[in-house]
Amino acid sequence: MATGARAIPRRWQRGHFWRVEVPQQLLKHLGLILVGVLFFFPFAWLVLTSLKSVQEIFLFPPTILPQKVVWSNYAKAVTAIPFLQYFENTMTITIGKIVGSVLSCSLVAYGFSRIEWPGRETVFVLVLATMMLPFQVTMIPLYIIFDRIHWIGTYYPLIIPSWFASAYFVFMLRQFFRTIPTELSEAARIDGCSEPRIYWQIILPLAQPALATLVLFQFMWTWNDFFGPLLYLNDPRNWTLALGLLQFRSSHAVAWEQLMAASTLVTLPSVIIYFFGQKTFIQGITTTGFK
Amino acid sequence: MAVSVFKMSRRVRRNLAWGLLFISPWIIGFLAFLVYPTLASFYYSFTSFSIVQRPEWLGLGNYTKLLLHDDNFVQSLLNTLYMVVLQIPLAIVLSFLSALLLNMKVRGLAIYRTIYFLPSVVPPIAASLLWVWILNPQQGIINDILKLVGLHAPGWFADPYWSKPAVILMGLWGVGGSTVLFLAALQGVPKGLYEAATLDGANWLHQTLNITIPLVSPVTLFMLITGIIDAFQIFTPVYVVNQGTSGAPQGSLLFYTLYLFANAFNYMKMGYASAMAWILFLIIILITIVMLRTSTYWTHYDL
């Protein structure tokens, strides 16, 4: 390093702080805020619309903040559609999928990382390759199978496949399982511990952070899913919140304030989970690349 | 020696048995939900088939009809191409710029990052409905603002020229996920490179062009490939806008997966839809191969 160039750091020169550093910081914040407003505004508009009266949302020029906060939009929204029923249905599917994928994916990931067996890496490449196949290819035969066994209209087509491991989560868990020292398993094996016990009593407890990521992603994807329920749930009693929201638009005059109230409610769990699990979430994205 | 080999092979056999047992959920799922449906769909793609009738062999009939005689199919491809050409570059530039902003050293970055990513967690159905409202030609806030500043207020989802830009706006709102990936790549660039460049007198622009962009190019490649695949799968917003598979106005929102879905489940042309699915699969494979091959010229894994 050329020490000469660093002899007098610029930030120690007199006046540098006020002349250069403060304006620079302000400029940076200005940029961040400007882009932040673009990202945040639609979200804010969702909530703001949900709190305005029918008359106010059609005012021109528009008001930003509600003249009077109309909480009753929420009461109307949850009674205009069977909101609680849809909530229950969505929860049933979400929990069913989370439990299924935690169990199956951790078992499979264990088999791909904690036991040495011939051909393991080759089979794992096959697991990764399945991620290339677009859902559209298998969609029609799957629909026909589920139709033949009378599962269309039930939650089974949505929940059951997740009990047979998904490539994404197996990949993610395997990456994590590989970081757990093999000595732990070896020592347990010498003590006569069987593989299922090592899996259940040693690996699973240590893998909690990875499992938390899985739960978070699975929650978000299932909660937010629209295509799956649209495909399989043709009985309105079994609809999820995502499907239920569409009902607001089927009437001629859309009650936008109610629709936005219902949408806010449907969005809320995802946002809350995101706020609490933000670190886990962002790590999950950066380590696996899926968003 | 013989004993140890015997012992070894017994251990290997035992491990193999356990290994297969542990991965058995995947094996069953792979066969039932992937191998069989893939083969079946390949077979259906050569037949005329609705769920109530048996498949009837057509040979290449579905494929020739799709490629030569189906204007809707061509339109769905063109619409998707429009998105690939416009949305993907915009999304990459926007997420890269946002990541650059989030990579600066200022206070309160966590708050900014939270806000930038927030739209990505909004359920697509809620996001779609929200944008239909925001871009409502008569009462939407965007057109209100445009009218107030005296600009032309487009019909957005009601106008065939503006409907796809509206979908693009909606998509750009959710670039937070890509921003996070770029940000991680930016943070992986060795600081020493910038210090050395500064000593050599390179300014911010030079550094960005010659250090940052080359070093995040693997992420750009990843985003390009997944972006194209995603463009072929756009469904929720265009289904929500028209409350169904019509793709209105004037077929401007008839996207690939929407048309496939309409064929399979509205018109019950499941053989035809299967052929569409296979064409999609081939396109995806082809694009991925081409991108990976050409990427050697412009992606850098180190400087």
Image (cartoon, coloured by chain):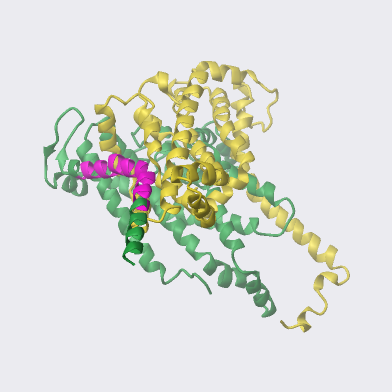
In the image, residue B106 lies in the stretch drawn in magenta: no
The answer to which image quadrant residue A123 occupies is bottom left
Q: Residue at x 30, y 38 (%)?
A: A139
Front residue of A211/B14: it is B14
Is residue A40 rendered to the left or right of residue A138? Answer: right
Q: What kind of secondary structure does the magenta stretch mostly adopt?
A: helix
Q: Please report the bounds of the magenta region as a residue range.
A: B15-42
Q: Residue furthest right?
A: A14
Q: Position of residue A227 (x, y in %)?
A: 39, 35
Name the quarter where the N terminus of chain B is drawn.
Answer: bottom left
Is residue A99 rendered to the left or right of residue B210? Answer: left
Chain B drawn in what color? green
From the rendered image, report the letter of the chain displayed in yellow.
A
Q: With respect to residue B258, does A13 lie above or below?
A: below
Residue B153 visible: no
Residue B221 visible: yes
Front residue of A173/A204: it is A204
Q: Residue at x 68, y 59 (%)?
A: B104
Q: Position of residue A166 (x, y in %)?
A: 40, 43
